[in-house]
Amino acid sequence: MPPGADPHLTVKASDYSDEQIREIEAAAEAWQQGHAETLADERKDEFTSSSGRTINALYTPADVARLSYLDDLGFPGQPPFTRGESAAGYRGKLWNWEFYAGFGSASDANKRYRYLLEQGGTGGVSIALDLPTQIGLDPDHPLAQLEIGRIGVSISTLQDVLDIFDGIELKKAAKIFTTANCIAPIALAWFYCLAEEKGEDATSFVVTIQNDPLKEYVARGTQFLPVSAAVELACDVIEFVAEKDYPWYPISVSGAHMKQAGGSCAQEVAFTLANALAYIDRLRDRNVAVESFAPKMELHFSTDMDFFEEVAKYRVARRLWSELLKERYGAEGIRPRLHGVASGAPLTAQQPLNNVVRIALEVLAQVFGGVAQTRTACYDEALAIPTEEAVKLSIRTNQIIAHETGIPDTVDPLAGSYYVEATTLAMYEEIRRILEDVDERGGAISAVESGHFSGELADESYRRQTELEEHRRVIVGVNEFVEDEDASINVFRHDPSVAERQLERLAQAKASRDQTAVDTALGNVRTAAEQRRNCVPAVIEAVRAGATTGEIAHAWRGVYGEWRSTLTGVR
Amino acid sequence: MTDRPLRVLIAKPGLDGHDRGAQIVARALRDAGMEVIYTGIRQTPEMIVTAALQEDVDCIGLSALSGALIEYSGEVIQLLREQGAADVEVVVGGIIAPGDEELLRAAGVAAVFGPGSSMADIVAAVRGGRSGARGTDTVVSERPG
């Protein structure tokens, strides 16, 4: 192996002979010279990808000469999964289209979920929680006042959860997802008790809980406990679901928010995998078998506008996940589970209908990337949370791509494109380098605590913003092709009476419960935390007894202490 | 009045934890030669005004993506007035629904920046505040220690 070469890259003979490659290189050289004048007259000084990688004018087999088809690409549904997580791809089953929704009270949210299921959303019920709930605060907390039901639904008690699912059969909804991260054990208890109350079998539907607190400290910001405590609680959820062997995904390790905080595709995948490895390492310390939970770990990424980098990203993420599980834990053949979100981040407040086109291109990229579960943004997201009209258009976008274009009719249709494979390979190498760097820094938990990840994202986002300001990158309607008039679309308006109604509900719930049972259950939550036992059984008991989100989170704060932000000078 | 650099407090009121925008703006202002302090996320209006007075800033930039900017900026401006620091300019950025800009301005916000705003415009607005209505010795001396 030549010095400096990546030890993970296959040393097996390339699919082309050395002689063939030399011939192609010589011909490419001749082509370049023959067209020197035309090639020098380009519309930009340099062509780079969104992450700053140089893009060549043309790609040939010489650019992928290092690839071995059988080892590096292989076949869909088997290691290294580059070409897809399932053998049949979308010929078997189309991707699910899911819509993240929720606002106001449980009954407001219930109406939207029913609408989505009726309109043909196939991704189940995807619950956006309001910020107080995500941070473990009840509506009656002083910090919660202006945020109740604003960006998601407010859930304090099991009754709120029951109201959300009023008239929705869990088996029919099939999938439930929520962005509970730092409160993940509470969310797990909600759905466990929900099945119990509705008398439905917990294995008849799939629950996915985001449960990835590490990235909260880096990019999303709902943390309220010290990092190590949050990781323990996350692992409790994974361990509990693995033991029950429910077909649930107890974690969706998320790069999406780090990407939306300005990260490149490579940083997104690398930091996500590093975080995933940190959870696995912790569970291994508890002697939980990797094979029992790794297939239940979802990886969640966000699809932006750089089409080919996005396609390559999903292909490379599957390969790396499969390889890392094998290399580090000897866990072979574990099928990756990717979740892609057609991102709201590139959507603009200016000329909002342009976002319809952006969303279609994002969905297309993640379909070419072979993602099985997807979430799709809506064209009005840069202005407010989506209206019904906007959500319906995003459903139709998925349906048009699925049923009218023929794109899903063969598996991994872009494979073998010299450019796509060269990009996939380049990203693979870059992500490997970042992962090595994280290892040298002592792993993801250290990189989160030291601020390394957030610093890297801040640098990248500043670089991207500077490109925009200098017009080296164009966003239609924002820095070029600008129009003066204001957006004239309908946007969703927050209903200020929600806060009052939620406060009333909470007061009623507290008044009508068996306080002794609640106190005992909360005492058990504290004891489990103090003794470092898996918290989930005690949290289930507390939720069942009528304890609120805020009360359970408060019990943890009492044991673990509380995370606080600090004032910093910007250097 | 001395020629000290403009001092700016970038603050995240409320529970919204998305601070990419706040951080980018903080850096842009720093690169434009200002002294910038960032509060971090999850601040109350009281915490923000206390920090602003302690740090003796000329301007507060509030950032929130969760939709409660009108209420938070109103409270910050009210507290500044109560503390005799009405000369501290308040500018805001984040998700701004159509029509909200007028409400924010009516609440006393000096400049409003929605998604897609340029760093250059934000820098210019913060600078403009100083050379404009405020920045005289009299106003500065009104501030508590």
Image (cartoon, coloured by chain):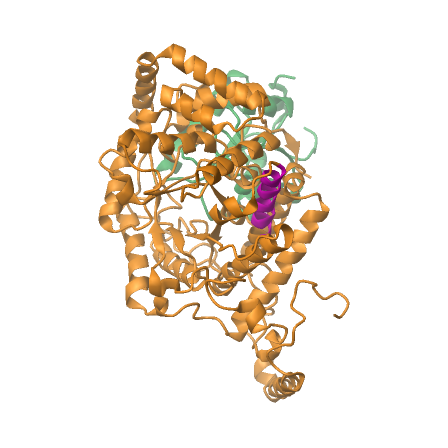
Of the pair A170 and B22, the residue shown nearer to us: A170
Magenta-drawn stretch contains A444: no
Residue drawn where x is 36% and y is 59% of the image: A360
Residue drawn where x is 38% and y is 46% of the image: A381
Where residue A72 appears, x then y in whole percent? 57, 67
Q: Residue furthest top?
A: A516
Where residue A122 appears, x then y in whole percent? 30, 51
Of the pair A256 and B89, the residue shown nearer to us: A256
Against A103, is A46 above or below? below
Rendering colour (chain A): orange
Of the pair A555 and A216, the residue shown nearer to us: A555
Left or right, A501 with reference to B93? left
Residue drawn where x is 65% and y is 68% of the image: A10
Left or right, B139 with reference to A168? right
Q: Quadrant of the C terminus of chain A?
A: top right
Magenta stretch, main secondary structure class: helix
Where residue B100 appears, x then y in whole percent? 37, 36
- The green chain is B
Where residue B50 appears, x then y in whole percent? 58, 21
Q: Quadrant of the N terminus of chain A?
A: bottom right
Left or right, A79 with reference to A159? right
Say which quarter of the image contains residue B95: top left
Which region is colored magenta? A270-285
Magenta-drawn stretch contains A273: yes
Left or right, A249 with reference to A466? left
* Residue A205 seen anywhere in this rendered image of the structure: yes
Say which quarter of the image contains residue B59: top right
